[in-house]
Image: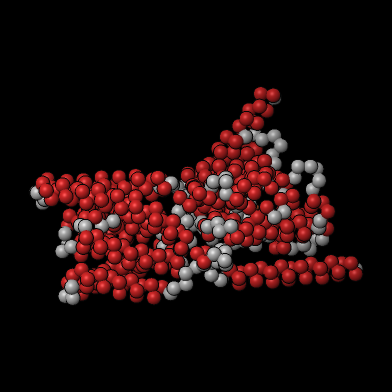
Amino acid sequence: MTNNLLEKAKSWTRSVLLKFARKLKTENDKGPVVRNARNLFSREIKIPIVVSLTFTVIAICCMFVIGLGVSYKTMLATAIFVAGVVFFIVRTQSVEKAILKDNDAVVLICLLFIIAVLTFQISKEYISPLASPVSVFTLIATMLLSLRIGIMYAVSLSLFVAFLNDMRFDVFLVMLCSSVAVMTNVQNIRRRADFVNVSFKTIAAAAAVITVFYFFDKYDISQFIRNLFYGILNGAFAIILLPVFIPLFEKLFSRTTNIKLIELSDFNNLLLKRLMLEAPGTYHHSIMTADIAEQAANVIDADSLLARVGAYYHDIGKLIKPQYFIENQVSNHNPHDELSPTMSSLILVSHVKEGVALSKKYNIDNEIINIIEQHHGTTSIHAFYHRALEQSPETDIENFRYPGPKPTTKVSAIVMIADSSEAACRSIEEPTVVKIKDMVEKIINNKFIDEQFSNCPITLKDLKAIRDSVISTLIGIYHARIEYKDKKE
Ligand SMILES: [Fe+2]
Ligand SMILES: [Fe+2]
């Protein structure tokens, strides 16, 4: 009787303490993004959206006054421009909620616009309006923000340059076509050397439009040659400006580009090197998970590079206590045998929090940190929960859950599925195609029933495609073992 009461009191105290710890964690999360307090560039820039927008409107007005003088034209151009920007922001708010809620992103949108119009003014005064590097700023906006914001930049900046130059239609078309040309295949820009391709695309688009205008007798031969030269100069700006602006804005505004992801996937990175040496089992599991996640992301048109790199880092927190995770246990000794189920589950759960802390310490990007934080969602550790149930039938499953949050993006959901599927298939003693299929289906169904995908925009169609992709990648990985066993039989 006394023992029973004592056990109940223990369980109640444990659950109260856990709830309190989780509350503390969520309250801390409301603070600004500070990846490394000692690094100035890692702090979030806290400028209110109203201040950024007002400053941009004043800058646009000043540019028109400088370019067109104080006249009704200036007033009209400014009014049209401000109306266009307001209209776009209102329209964008419904589809780009995440970006417009991020102060860093809004400051970047405004700052980029101001730098762009300043550059155009210089180009108009000293070179030619045709040399205005609209495509460069469009590409920066697309890579650092989103394709929609890139399109907004392409249209509004092309209009802006045309406005500054007596509404010249040739200038507008050259700017717009070169911007659209560089926006195609942005996903393929993964190395700094790819900026050369951007330059060629700008030159090709500009040359094509200028040639069309020449054929329609808008230019004489000398104007045609001169304008072609300015088109080439415009393309050359891409090689000069992109390698300077992209890394600078990436660092200043905590944005993640494909170039940064490729750098993070380099196995010479200190964190990945440590994982390889200190937790080889987890390292191997992460590489397998990355293969599965990348293929699945490709199938549903999600960001496959982010899925791969996110999977490399998803279990980085296991570096703190690697021997407590089954994949790193080389001998028969299992340290969990000497621990209570609650203590074991607390150690396992802590690898998520440790992963986030380590990534912040090593200045890993926020998009990767989100994947680390969400890769277990709020799932429970069944093995230790069942062991605890055997000891005390009143054990609460909530005490054996990961703290979350649940996946908020398709990529996080893919990494979650790939992670569980890889770990589960590794434990199958004699893998067969049927066993792998059943296992993956069971994992996805259980996570769906447990509402792990309730915060992410993934559809049932996506889940079906991910399931098929994960099964086929796993069959590919275990192909040799399956075939060998079949022959033996
Ligand atoms: Fe994990
Ligand atoms: Fe994992």
Along the viewing direction, whichever of 27 and 172 lies nearer the viewer: 172
326 left or right of 236?
Answer: right
Spot occupied by residue 120 in the image (x, y as percentages of width and height): 26, 62
Residue 85 visible in this rendered orientation of the protein: yes
| Quarter occupied by residue 61 | bottom left
- Residue at left offset 77%, top offset 62%: 395
Is 222 on the left or on the right of 354, as rendered?
left
Q: Residue reaching furthest front? A: 126
Identify the residue shown where x is 69% and y is 59%: 350
- In front here: 289 or 182? 182
Color encoding of the figure: secondary structure
Q: Position of residue 254 (x, y in %)?
A: 48, 61
Q: Position of residue 288 (x, y in %)?
A: 60, 42
Image quarter where the N terminus lies is bottom right
**In the figure, is residue 191 to the left or right of 437?**
left
Q: What residue do we see at 34% from left, 52% from top?
A: 240
Q: Quick check: 6 above or below 223? A: below
In the rendered view, tell whether residue 296 sits above or below residue 483: below
Total residue callouts: 0
Where residue 352 sits in the image (x, y, percent)?
64, 58
Using the image as rendered, state which of residue 449 and residue 299 is in the foreground: 299
Quadrant that contains the C terminus? top right
Q: Do we see residue 442 in this rendering?
A: no
Residue found 53% across the figure and 50% down from its top: 264
